[in-house]
Image (spheres, helix red, strand yellow):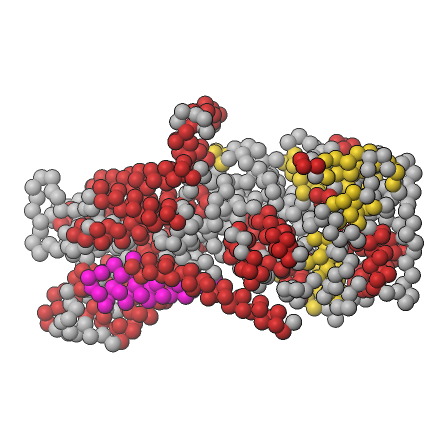
Amino acid sequence: MKFVQNIFDQTRPLVEKDGKRNIFYPLHNAIETMAFVPDHTAHSGAHVRDAIDLKRTMVTVIFAMVPALLFGMWNIGRLHFGAFGEESTLIDNVIFGAMKLLPLIIVTYAAGLGVEIYFSWKRNHPVNEGFLVSGLLIPMIMPVDIPLWMVAVSTIFAVLIGKEVFGGTGMNLLNPALTARAFAFFAYPTWMSGDKVWINTTSADGGQLVDGYSGATALGDLATTVGQGLGNPSTETVMAQFGPEGTYSLMNAFLGLIPGSIGETSAALILLGGLFLVFKGVGSWRIMVSFFIGGFVMAAIFNAFAVNEFMGLNPLHQLMLGGFMFGMVFMATDPVSAAQTTTGKLIYGFLAGFFGIMIRVFNPAYPEGIMLAILFMNVMAPLIDHYVVEANVKRRAKRLANA
Amino acid sequence: MSQTFKIRKGHDIKLIGGAPKTDLGRITASTYAVTPLDFPGITPKLAVKAGTQVKAGDTLFFDKDRPEVKICSPVSGEVAEVKRGAKRKILAVLILADSETTYADHGAFGFSGATREAAAAHFSATGVGAFITSRPYGVAAGMSEKPRAIFVNGIQSGPLSGDLAYQLEGKEKSIATALKALKLMTEGTVYVSHDADRAPIEALQSLDATHITFSGKHPKGLVGTQIAQTAPLNKGEIVWTVNAIDLPTIGAAFETGEYRPEYRVTVAGSKAMNAGYATALQGVSLTSFVSANVNTDNTRLIAGDVLTGTKIEKDDFLSFGRTQLTAIPEGNKTEFFGWVLPGFGKFSMNRAFWSWLFPNREYDLDTNMHGEERAFVVTGEYEKFIPMDIFPQQLLRSILIGDIEKMEQLGIYEVVPEDFALAEVACTSKLPLQEIVRKGLNDLRKEMI
């Protein structure tokens, strides 16, 4: 390790305050502190400190995302070869998926970290770790065929407007990854919705798509049933896909064998990541559980008063589709943009899940109601916290009055 | 009968190097020092200058705003030097001790028919009033204050803390006298707290006071926790707190009129070559004791425990009000990819490291920060270590933006810096919580006076 340390020591004078390449100081510092936990010692207050730091917290989240990410990679290849009716092995699928996914990840990190490093240099503070997670979340919630430059623009927008204008990591109002997706969704709608973007159908060897191929997502198909009434024969073909034998069966949706944004399809692996986060004490179980309950309650209400097939879908099935599970585990739990008080977290999670399903079903033009609901609740979170904290303040004032 | 409270929020940090009941003898030295820095909230005004002959119990300096708050000399001798820092700030008063200590005689206190005023005057004159801390603000108590209650803290639960029963051994009589004196100072209740998880201390159990018992985790031994559980402090109220270990000194001052701040000091920590208990006067030079009993190679020497103690050097003096010396390794070394490794052997109070599998392991912790300072990111973390009905992060934020009204609403009157010590250890963002709280209390006090 000594020689690695030497490299940092030798290059440090170049980037320090009076060095020629001062603009690279945050980058130098970021890489150095990543390689070596610094030798800083406690100078005020407690003399010993917990081993945990923000890097550890963030890398724990990344570990939790890995299963869903790898599955998404494999699913890209599986859907691509499936569309052409070609046989493919696990390795084929993963390699194809990696070719599609890795550029997305690299572009996101480059664009986002570029902005972060610039602001670190301008504001003279170290690069924060928050983007390590955001930078991986963004590719996971994009359609596979989105052009790289759109991802870059969305990421830059999210980091700049979603985070840095508020003061950087820890100060942001909105979840940066969702801000990126919302930006892409409204700026480039044709690339973010419809039935062309979820499965890669560019064939290198002039292959033909199989008969009856549809590139739509489950939610896209469900949206077509709106306005047709319940039990209308014209919706039969669509709804058959949601039956036990269909493409979007509950089992397929749970396992993730359906088209969708890259990392969001496998409810099973996302749940695994969620359990890992809760077990590690990094993710808030309160938010996850209340989010699930909120979504379930809304879906059950729809189910009870269904006037179309979308509303009538089995509540559990409803929750396995789209970005619900992903939003629950990885998006709503972002500690900075979520509610911060214990009671607030329960309210925040419940309403985010509740509104998510509501937006999705009431306005089929926005199949990704979850994204909008979480962003909306991000904005509402300080208000929720305000009332929770205010209750404490009142309790204290009352005690004073009685004293 | 006494009430028992169980403290569930908190953590016992287990460190190696606990003190066995070994007598390490007496710490003697020819120089002593008293520093105003040990007394938050005091603007020191000197009563002596270099060359002044003082007796033990003569005032060295007092608070400019409250002259009755006097800090006295622990020994007799000649004031050798008044150390000053930037802007002539007084750093320490150094005293060259006589070989035979002579005491200033303030006279034994007559308890029969004694008034509060008389007791207050005696507290002030003998210097033992400085052992009383006043809340809110956590500063030395002014004798004109009217405390709602007085809490005597009979629990030591910090890391490597000493056995209070052993430290108080043989001082039963003066402990009872001290309590009598304290009772004169308030019309309210005098509480005495006990640790349900250690053998009861007879000298404290037998006191005529309201007894409260705490079991569970640290910070049960912080008087802030004890107040919050019994009767939280409201705006406008004042509560005094006294550590049980200081009772014998207070009692002696009332029995004999002499100031004898002598303690059985706990010496602990992995860097202590000889752990145990040493007898010492407050302010004694530690130079020779430390070189004989502590491995000083790359060592952090702390007066107090690792959570709330003050950093001292090996040629420093025993700080006022501290009865524990802790020596742990400095952590001034880097660690290759330390944040990624599983961390089976790492000390952490949450499960992000796999060391949670071994909850009873004792650690040899050093002073490394294990990361750089960041903004508030993680939420719900501090609450796990502060057993009070407050919102710690919101309170800290209100302090950082200097919003006095918000601080009051969020309960700053109920806390002092030490109450945030465990949360500070746990803080993922490595923020200086105790420093922030101290700043908040200072701002508030400035505003109020």
On the rendered structure, is B104 left or right of A228?
right
Q: What is the residue that sits farthest to the bottom in this orientation? A: A305
- In the displayed structure, A95 sits above or below B390; it is above
Q: Position of residue B445 (x, y in %)?
A: 64, 55
The reply to whether residue A6 is visible in this rendering is yes
The residue shown at (89%, 50%) is B258
On the rendered structure, is A84 left or right of A375?
left
Q: Position of residue B4 (x, y in %)?
A: 68, 66
- In the displayed structure, A359 sits above or below A112; it is below
Magenta extent: A342-371
- Name the one closer to the observer, B157 or A22: A22
Q: Position of residue B214 (x, y in %)?
A: 68, 62
- Name the one closer to the observer, A99 or A248: A99
On the rendered structure, is A32 left or right of A236?
right
- Name the one closer to the observer, A323 or A85: A323
Q: Is residue A331 magenta?
A: no
The residue shown at (80%, 61%) is B182
Q: Kindly indicate the quadrant of the structure image that contains residue B409.
A: bottom right
- The C terminus of chain B is located in which quarter? bottom right
Q: Position of residue B78 (x, y in %)?
A: 86, 36
Q: Is residue A357 magenta?
A: yes
On the rendered structure, is A208 left or right of B115?
left
- In the displayed structure, B48 sits above or below B216; it is above
Name the dominant secondary structure of the magenta segment: helix
- The N terminus of chain B is located in which quarter? bottom right
